[in-house]
Amino acid sequence: QVQLVESGGGLVQAGGSLRLSCAASGIIFSTYTMGWYRQAPGKQRALVAIITSVGSTYYTPSVKGRFTVSRDNAKTTVYLQMNSLKPEDTAVYYCTASSRGDENPRWDSWGQGTQVTVSS
């Protein structure tokens, strides 16, 4: 059974930083592409960043240069380091996993989400 458990969300002032973690179990983590999505109130869930099985990364333009996605295969955990946070980054952040380990993921599983709130 696949489980993705996010942590690290919270309330932070604009300009601050947070690091989200997503601990995965029930998958061969090192072979999976992992992703982070977010959903702001009244908006659709949107892709934030992905990291493939070989460590290639992609970021949505609005977070490029501020956010960094990384993975620790030994800990079966993916991270999202978020710096220079803005109020518009406020959302529920979700971790997701694709058994296709490449840059064309098909998301198989989702975490429960963690709230990030950035105050102005």
Image (spheres, helix red, strand yellow):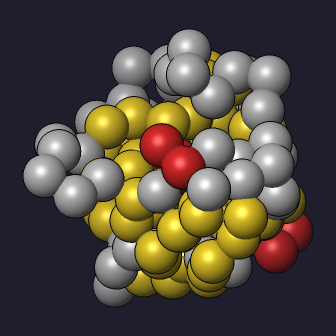
Residues 17 and 15: in front is 15
At a point 82% along the width and 57% down the height, the residue shown is 16
Residue 29 on image: x %, y %: 62, 60
User: Image height check: is 94 above or below 115?
Assistant: above
Residues 1 and 46: in front is 46
At a point 48% along the width and 43% down the height, the residue shown is 88
Name the side, left or right, on which 13 lies relative to 62.
right
The residue sitting at the front extreme is 120
> To which quarter of the image does residue 112 belong?
bottom left
The residue sitting at the top extreme is 61
In the rendered image, which quarter contains the N terminus? bottom left
Count the marks: 0
Residue 98 on image: x %, y %: 40, 45
Residues 48 and 73: in front is 48
Name the side, left or right, on which 105 lies relative to 6.
left
At a point 82% along the width and 74% down the height, the residue shown is 75
Name the side, left or right, on which 71 lies relative to 11.
right
Answer yes or no: is residue 33 visible.
no
Residue 58 on image: x %, y %: 61, 21
Residue 4 on image: x %, y %: 47, 76
> To which quarter of the image does residue 86 belong?
top right
Residues 30 and 120: in front is 120
User: Image height check: is 53 above or below 82?
Assistant: above
In the rendered image, which quarter contains the C terminus? bottom right
Answer yes or no: is residue 113 visible.
yes
User: Image height check: is 46 above or below 25?
Assistant: above
Name the side, left or right, on which 20 lies relative to 46.
right
